[in-house]
Every structure is written in C-alpha cells, then in structure tokens.
Image (cartoon, rainbow, N blue to C red):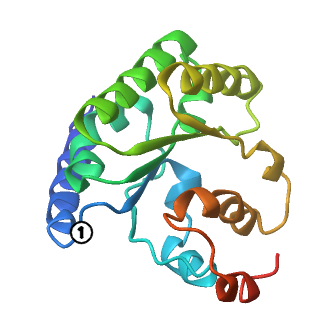
Amino acid sequence: MSIMQQTFKEQTKLFYGEMNTLAENGGVVFFGTDLFAKLPFGELAQSFHLEERIYNRSMENMRIGDAAELLNSCVLDLNPSKVFFHLGDTDVCAAEFDVDAFIAQYEWILYTLHTKTKATAYVVSLLTDSPKATMVNQRLKALAQETGTRFVDITGIRYMEKRELHLFDIMKHDIRSHPLRFEDAVNMVAL
C-alpha cells in the first residue's frame, strides 16, 4: 500500500470519526463504492418522503480490503439499524481479482456487522459491465442467503435513464422503518 493510500485511509477515518460525533445512533448507513458515492442521498430521501436518518459512508474506487479497514469508522461506530453494502464494482474490474478472496472478505464484513450490531444488512448487487459481475452477483446472493442478509438485485437498472432514481425507488421500502403513510404515497415522485 502506498503512503498516499495510507494517508487517505487515515484521513477518512479521522473525518468520519468527527462526523460520527454529530450522527445519531440507529440510522441507515450506505457503505459502498462509486454508485453509492455519487448518489445525493439527502435529496433523494426528501423526494421520497423518508424520515429516516441516512448516512452515506461511501467513496469512489473503494475496494473490499479498504472497506474492511474502514468498517469501524464508517459503519460500526454509527450503531446503525440498517446497512446497505455496495462493494465490488471496483474489485471485479481489477486484473488480479480473486472471487474466492473477495467473497471471504465480504463474509467477514457481514459477520463483523452481525456480531457487533443489531443492524439489518443488505447486500446490493454489482452494477458494472464486467463479464465477471454475473458470477459475482450469484455468489453474493448465495452469501446473503447463507448469512441471513437481504440481497437487493439492482442489475435491471444498469441501462436505464435516471438510474439513481430507480435505484432509490428499489431500496426505499427497505430504507423505511415504518409502513408507508397514505399522504406519502400520494406525494411520491413519479419516475
């Protein structure tokens, strides 16, 4: 690991450590790579009339090893009620990608979450065009079933316009911690 990568991870830990002092326990955490890093979660939550506290702890180009190192400061320290993981789009595109090692690290992350919190975990499928993505998604779905984690398949939005809105539309029911109220249904954003 380069000094620049190490410095970035340390700065990330410090930054989120400070941000976590402002956060409230029991929120919904999004922890992933490029797709999640680019989403304006606050605006989307408002548009979909969600009242849950949402914390985005995602970053571009994050790999599974980075996620394991940042798990405490980005997820566990928040004591979340729900965590959406979207990890692997960067990993699967690497020439040296090892699916077994990737799944083993993902399993460790889920195990750690399950043993240190009462959070419900969601594994969100890969969205990359990599030829390996289909196989990895099958393995992630099996891992989710084995670990009592929910699997969210978003592959259907890959080529859609406004895919961020469609992604959030898919996840909104899982984000919400209470049933949809009638007035919220009437005011929903039309896709």
Residue at horizontal 50 percent and vertical 58 percent from the top: 37
Query: Percent x, y for residue 95?
Result: 59, 20
Q: Nearer the viewer, residue 27 or 94?
A: 27
Q: Residues within 10 Å of mark 1 (few under 14, many from 20)?
A: few
Quarter that holds the N terminus:
top left
Left-right relation of 12 to 147: left
Residue at horizontal 24 percent and vertical 62 percent from the top: 25
Quarter that holds the C terminus:
bottom right
Residue at horizontal 44 percent and vertical 35 percent from the top: 63
Amino acid type, mark 1? Glu
87, above or below 74, in the image: above
Query: Percent x, y for residue 142?
Result: 62, 20
Left-right relation of 172 to 120: right
Left-right relation of 138 to 54: right
Tally the marks.
1
Residue for badge 1 = 24
14, above or below 183, in the image: above
Displayed quadrant of residue 169: bottom right
Residue at horizontal 48 percent and vertical 77 percent from the top: 42
Q: Nearer the viewer, residue 128 or 103?
A: 103
Query: Percent x, y for residue 94?
Result: 57, 26
- Element under disc 1: loop
Query: Percent x, y for residue 80?
Result: 32, 54
51, above or below 7, in the image: below
